[in-house]
Image: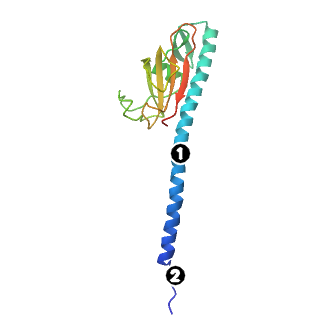
């Protein structure tokens, strides 16, 4: 009489089926978590922009200046009393780094790579279907690593109208 110390073929098949079912239910959950994380990052960036604008506004009142303010050792240029929507000003306000890769104008087809966010600044207003609260001025866009500038971004728009506050928001439908 022989002792078998291994699995039978049926036991092995059952284990593989159980693992397959578990993987099939866990993978969609993991993918949704990644999308939720991207949405949260874009929303948090929008909130950080709002906080930075409040701090610049306070600094502007303290310095009694309408053209520029010193913010953490950097000069922030103001347009109509609000930060210029350009990449350098936004980087200083949010303490962000630009991507280390070569910049490409193909922001709608080439995903962001090299840093947590890509920045496209000082753009004249262009009609983006996702943004309905900006009708003039200049806009700066931020989109997360791994995404293109389409459906998953935060934005800051200086409408360049006297005493009109900037518009800050996000679009997360494509995250």
- Residue 58 position within the rendered picture, expressed as x and y whole percent measured from the top left: 64, 14
CA distance for labels 2 and 1:
42 Å
Q: Is residue 146 above or below residue 76?
A: below
Q: Residues within 10 Å of mark 2 (few under 14, many from 20)?
A: few
The disc placed on residue 140 is none
- Residue 71 position within the rendered picture, expressed as x and y whole percent measured from the top left: 57, 17
Q: Tell me, what colour scheme is on the image?
A: rainbow
Asked whether 44 or 20 is in front, the reply is 20
Asked whether 135 or 94 is in front, the reply is 135
Name the residue beneath numbered marker 1.
32
Q: Is residue 101 above or below residue 24?
A: above
Hey, which quadrant is residue 54 in on the image? top right
Q: Is residue 175 above or below residue 136?
A: below
Q: Nearer the observer, disc 2 or disc 1?
A: 1
Name the residue at the bottom extreme.
1
Asked if the residue under mark 1 is in contact with the one under mark 2, i.e. CB atoms within 8 Å, the reply is: no
Which numbered disc, 2 or 1, marks the residue that appears first in the sequence? 2
Name the residue beneath numbered marker 2.
5
Q: Residue at x 61, y 14 (%)?
A: 57
Left of 167 or right of it: where is 88? Answer: left
Q: Residue at x 49, y 78 (%)?
A: 8
Hey, which quadrant is residue 56 in on the image? top right
- Residue 173 position within the rendered picture, expressed as x and y whole percent measured from the top left: 51, 34
Which structural element holds mark 2? loop
- Residue 119 position within the rendered picture, expressed as x and y whole percent measured from the top left: 45, 26
Which structural element holds mark 1? helix
Q: Is residue 172 above or below residue 13?
A: above
Q: Residues within 10 Å of mark 1 (few under 14, many from 20)?
A: few
Hey, which quadrant is residue 93 in on the image? top right
Q: How many marks?
A: 2
């Amino acid at each position: 009489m022989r002792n078998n110390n291994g699995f039978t073929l049926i036991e092995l098949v059952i284990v593989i089926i159980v693992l397959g079912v578990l993987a099939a239910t866990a993978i969609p959950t993991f993918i949704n978590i990644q999308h939720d994380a991207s949405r949260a990052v874009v929303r948090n960036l929008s909130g950080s922009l709002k906080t930075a604008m409040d701090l610049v506004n306070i600094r502007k009142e303290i310095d009694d200046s309408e053209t520029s303010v010193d913010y953490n050792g950097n000069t922030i240029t103001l347009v109509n009393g609000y930060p210029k929507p350009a990449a350098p000003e936004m980087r200083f306000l949010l303490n962000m780094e630009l991507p280390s890769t070569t910049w490409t104008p193909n922001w709608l087809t080439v995903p962001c790579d090299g840093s947590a966010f890509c920045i496209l600044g000082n753009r004249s207003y262009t009609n983006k279907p996702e943004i309905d609260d900006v009708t003039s001025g200049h806009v700066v866009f931020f989109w997360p690593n791994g995404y293109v500038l389409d459906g998953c971004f935060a934005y800051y728009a200086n409408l360049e109208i006297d005493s009109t506050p900037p518009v800050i928001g996000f679009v997360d439908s494509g995250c």
